[in-house]
Image: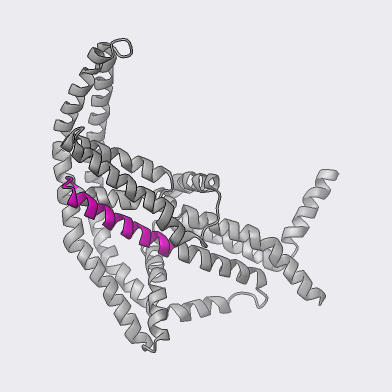
Amino acid sequence: MSMVRLIKGWMERYFSDEEALFLLLLLVVGLLIIVSMGHVLAPVIGSVIIAYLLRSPLILLERKGVPHMLAVSIIFGFFMAVCLALLVYVVPAVFTQGSQLFNELPRMVRKGQELLMLLPQRYPDLVSAEQIHTWIDSAAKEAAGLGQWLVSFSLQTLPNLMALLIYAVLVPILVFFFLKDGQSMISWWVSTLPNRRHLIGRVWREMDQQIANYIRGKVLEIIIVGICTYIAFFWLDLRYAALLAILVGLSVVVPYIGAAAVTVPVVLVAYFQFGWGNEFIYLMSVYFVIQALDGNVLVPLLFSEVVNLHPVVIILAVLIFGSMWGFWGVFFAIPLATLIKAVLTAWPKGLQQIKTEAAE
């Protein structure tokens, strides 16, 4: 009976109000839509995110007296110019460098085998020649499996080229209309909600402030880290500078884990190009300085008042949402964790506020 009373008391505390039940229903329906129709609605979701990122400069222009349609045209034109620049300059460079790296992999593998074969001579008590041959055979099998996966992946992506072309046309159109009519869409959505929405409003304000600033800050961090890394790699004459810089920029999406993972290809490419020379030391020193500035200066500057999550919670969110939705789950792991935190924080406070207002 004590357990029944405990559960009953918990239910009355959190679900005794109709607004709390409506918020729970909204969250469940939204989750079900994303899980069941996320693939179909991918261009719509992506367009909403892009329009959300562009809304701040749009509002800034309107506050300076620029008419709404002119401001929308300016922001949308800037967005299309950035997309065109990426398509014309960045994508071909990355594709070319990726092809060059793939062609150079056999030479790197042979050089790595030669280095491994020197280990039994230098450390005979720790490593034997048989162990080295076993490692090489295992690596060869993994490389063969990776090659087969790349071939099958390229064949599987061929039917999706038409879908990519459709998305390339559909997403800009949706972004334009979300920028143009976004406020009216939000007003219509708000009009469908119950008149009493203290709890929903509290959660929305918390989510809008935290998640919007996080997404904008994360995109800005990717751009800054990627550009600084490319300048450093290009200045130090590292091969595949554009490809590695993009990897380093995208690595900030995954806190803690991303920086450690992307260091491996940077070290390998630098070693196979420069060896253990001064150039290698200079490049790695500059690379670690960029990582240190990102973690200790840029991140606190961009997110000091945005994300207040424990590192363990961040890692758990990355693992859980990444396993559910892949790359996008990793990218939105912290915003989703922030949303859950906002709901858990506002729920009892919102209900208490409702009860207080009702008593008054």
How many numbered discs, if any? 0
Q: Going by the image, does 150 lie left or right of 343? A: left
Q: Foreground residue, 116 or 72? A: 116
Q: Position of residue 183 (x, y in %)?
A: 46, 80
Q: Is residue 233 magenta?
A: yes
For the question of whether residue 84 can be seen, the reply is yes
The quadrant where residue 199 appears? bottom right
Residue depicted at 33% across the width and 52% down the height? 250
Q: Position of residue 151 (x, y in %)?
A: 21, 39
Q: What is the magenta range?
A: 215-240
Vertical order, 327 against 343 (above or below): above
Residue depicted at 41% across the width and 74% down the height? 55
Quarter in which the C terminus is drawn: bottom right
Vertical order, 183 against 17 (above or below): below
Q: Foreground residue, 288 or 344? A: 288
**How are the colours assigned in the image?**
one colour
Name the main secondary structure of what is drawn in magenta: helix
Q: Is residue 124 magenta?
A: no
Q: Foreground residue, 189 or 326? A: 326
Q: Going by the image, does 325 lie left or right of 248? A: right
Q: Going by the image, does 84 lie left or right of 264? A: left
Q: Foreground residue, 138 or 104? A: 104
For the question of whether residue 253 can be seen, the reply is no
The quadrant where residue 65 appears? bottom left
The quadrant where residue 124 appears? top left
Quarter in which the N terminus is drawn: top right
Q: Position of residue 229 (x, y in %)?
A: 27, 52
Residue depicted at 24% across the width and 62% down the height? 165
Q: Position of residue 150 (x, y in %)?
A: 23, 40
Q: Going by the image, does 251 lie left or right of 37? A: left
